Image: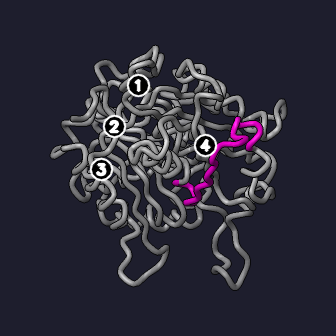
Amino acid sequence: MSKEPVAVVGIGQTAHVAARRDVSLAGLVREAARRALDDAALDWRDIDAVVIGKAPDFFEGVMMPELFLADALGAVGKPLLRVHTAGSVGGSTALVAANLVAARVHRTVLTLAFEKQSESNAMWGLSLPIPFQQPLLAGAGGFFAPHVRAYMRRSKAPDTIGSLVAYKDRRNALKNPYAHLHEADLTLEKVQSSPMLWDPIRYSETCPSSDGACAMVLTDRTGAARSPHPPAWLHGGAMRSEPTLFAGKDFVSPRAGRDCAADVYRQAGITDPRREIDAVEMYVPFSWYEPMWLENLGFAAEGEGWKLTESGVTALDGDLPVNPSGGVLSTNPIGASGMLRFAEAALQVRGRAGDHQIDGARRALGHAYGGGAQFFSMWLVGADRPE
């Protein structure tokens, strides 16, 4: 039996800020869910199941929050499933929901991911004590900085590339009313002179800590036909994982990421991603990961990713725009960051991305990774229903 085509018919996100003190956790997730339902012109009674995801519970100190959030999400009496794959969880949560529709288990599913980082300290949460890790790190940046340096040595990239990415994404965020950081006075020189946190990663080349949530409504062909707005159709989706540490692991271009992208392209019939994909929402929490992931995802040959960034290919007006929304560098509610990439890709092909819309976008890739570059989730969505 063939799979049921899956359509994204509703997308909602909250305002993202350092601290949403005006709402509780339940209020935060309900805000995103309500906006997604309104976009789809549906109500709670139209939802058959809910799939929820977030980053590790110790980030907020609330264990199994899905249990008390069921009421806020209209999930009373409905199946509710929690997904967790570290920072990639927003993407994998959306894929689990999509698979429920594709397998005809449910017809219409609401999927949601969130984080309220202001109620904890994620950096210290990521800094595990001895003997669980060497006493050399502070937060995720301390873990990933050596891999960035390895990429710089391998590719011979100039040390200006990271600042170019950060400046681009923060400028894109000015066109996104939901983005956390709106730095209208930011200049390239300010990025390049910001404090060094983890060599070679500077302060302005890192993601913020955000409170926020993102939700989507996924449905089948019948549901898509009733949608008041054009849907985004799922053309391919995949998850892959590998251990954080093992002999021979390529931290610069993890095998799991390459395999995940290849599977998505195979499903979608993509043979030349550089030419056939119109926009990319890529998980870039530290700016150097744009050129690294351009290579990992097959948009550039090994050692060539930084040249796409330097030449302006990935700019909003380039021929492969990366993170038109401002990306993770501008908005980072960790549990929702991956779903935001998926949702923003869907907004592009629906023609509903507002001021950061890419003209003529027909196919877009949403990408997320998490843990020690060990979990990967991706989907490719299009304006046309797949055959």
In-image side of 139 versus 191 (left or right): right
Amino acid type of the residue tagged 2 in the rendering: Pro
Based on the displayed image, in which of its 4 quarters is residue 134 positioned?
A: bottom right
Q: Which residue lies under the disc numbered 3?
A: 264
Q: Is residue 382 magenta?
A: no
Evaluate if marks 1 and 2 touch, with contact meaning CB atoms under 8 Å apart: yes
Q: Is residue 43 above or below residue 189?
A: above
Q: Earlier in the sequence, mark 1 or mark 4?
A: 4
Q: CA distance from mark 3 to mark 2?
A: 15 Å
Dot 4 amino acid type: Val
Q: Which residue is mark 1?
A: 224
Give the magenta part as a residue range: 70-88
Q: CA distance from mark 1 to mark 2?
A: 10 Å
Residue at 57% across, 40% down: 111
Q: CA distance from mark 3 to mark 1?
A: 22 Å
Residue 53: tell me if it is visible: yes
Where in the figure is residue 225, as x and y percent of width and height? 39, 20
Question: What is the CA distance from the residue labelled 4 to the residue labelled 2?
Answer: 19 Å
Between 185 and 299, the one lying in front of the other is 299
Local crowd size for mark 3, using a 10 Å CA cut-off: few (<14), some (14–19), many (≥20) = many
Q: CA distance from mark 1 to mark 4?
A: 18 Å
User: Outermost residue, top direction?
Assistant: 228
Closer to the chain start, of discs 3 and 2, is: 2
At x 80% / y 58%, what residue is drawn?
61
Residue 5 is labelled as 2
User: Camera-side residue: 68 or 214?
Assistant: 68
Q: Is residue 160 visible?
A: no
**Depicted 112 relative to depicted 63: above or below:** above
Q: Which residue is mark 4?
A: 50
Tag 3 secondary structure: helix
- Report helix, strand or loop for mark 4: strand
Q: In the rendered view, would you say 245 is above or below 85?
A: below
